[in-house]
Image (tube, helix red, strand yellow):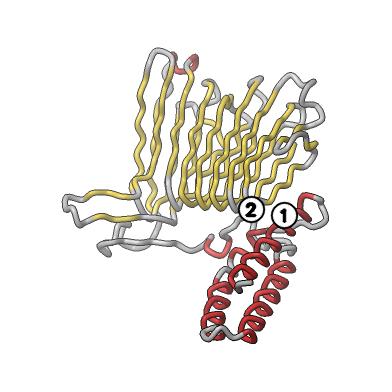
Amino acid sequence: MKYERIIWGVLLLFVGGVLLLENLNVIEFYWRNVWGFWPIFLIIGGVNLLLNRNGSQTGSIVSLAILIITLAFLFVKGQEKPQHSNWFGFWKNKNIDADINWEDEHNGNGKFEGVKFSESLNTADTAKKTILNLSGGGTSFKLKETTDSLFEASVNKKKGNFSLTKTTTDTTNTLTFRMNDRRYKGNKNNWTFNSGGNEVDVRINTAPQWTMNLSMGAGELDFDLTQFKIRTLNFDGGAADLKIKIGDLLPIADVNVKTGVANVEIKVPQGSGCRIKTHTGLASKDFKGFVKKDDGYYETPNYHTSKNKVFIKLDGGLSNFEVDTY
């Protein structure tokens, strides 16, 4: 048997065994704990190249032993309680800036620059469906408070430009608040990529019915939506830390989350019936108070009897998903 097949067989057995033990509630495994140790596999690859140049059986045995010891270490490490609340706690207080033309985009002294955005509320807006499209990379978004305006955002920024636009029809308002990561500056070779260090406090009005389309490559988003009428929330993120608290002001609320590598925490009202549908790969799932139904489906005990319903769809790769009631 080829050595490469043995290596892949051991890796698949490790991943499959951990997932099985998780599903059987034998262990609680935090994939985020082992993510930072990925360079180990580069070391194992280097050892393999050095020891197996001549097809030496001894070299293969040594390489396999190193792999098994590494996986045993990761198995123990993965069961430790994470020290950070998100996947990227190590970089949480660090700014990652990549300027292709090395041009300084911030205000010159490395400090935050405060910018405010606002869209006033018209009388007709209260009866309209309102769509909020929000996007930004390397940014921390928070929504905790209400406003008398339709929308407000207070931005503390180090990098990038933010913009707010509004389009209106007879039945719908569409607000688009975004950070422009890439900006053309008059020269086809003069592009700038900005990321990191931005903080945005968002406030919205309680009167309209909201649909939220949230998108970010990397960053943090913490939305307390208990005071707002949220009909649909769509989140599409790469490496993100997402916290959402849903209210019960509408009979039906849809929450759709699609992630790559992320930490996702969702809280739903205890009085609302909730169904979760999952389509995940190497994901950790913790659904407190839910009963597993068919493959990939979970429900609260009061799902069929409650007046209000929350439907959650989770689609992610190497992510941590937690759903709880309050």
Name the residue carrying label 1.
19
Asked if residue 326 is positioned above or below residue 138 in the image, the reply reads above
Asked if residue 186 is positioned above or below residue 121 in the image, the reply reads below
Name the residue carrying label 2.
282
Q: Nearer the viewer, residue 263 or 224?
A: 263
Residue 143: percent from the left, percent from the top? 54, 39
Residue at the (53%, 34%) spot, across then down? 234
Give whichever of discs 1 and 2 has the lower sequence position: 1
Q: Look at the image and tell me in which quarter the C terminus lies.
A: top right
* Kind of element beneath mark 2: loop
Residue at the (72%, 38%) spot, across then down? 295
* Kind of element beneath mark 1: helix
Amino acid identity at mark 2: Leu
Residue 217: percent from the left, percent from the top? 46, 49
Using the numbered discs, state the Cα–Cα distance from disc 1 to disc 2 in whole angstroms: 8 Å
Residue at the (67%, 28%) spot, across then down? 310
How many neighbours does mark 2 have within 10 angstroms: few (below 14), some (14-19), or many (20 or more)?
some
Residue 291: percent from the left, percent from the top? 80, 36
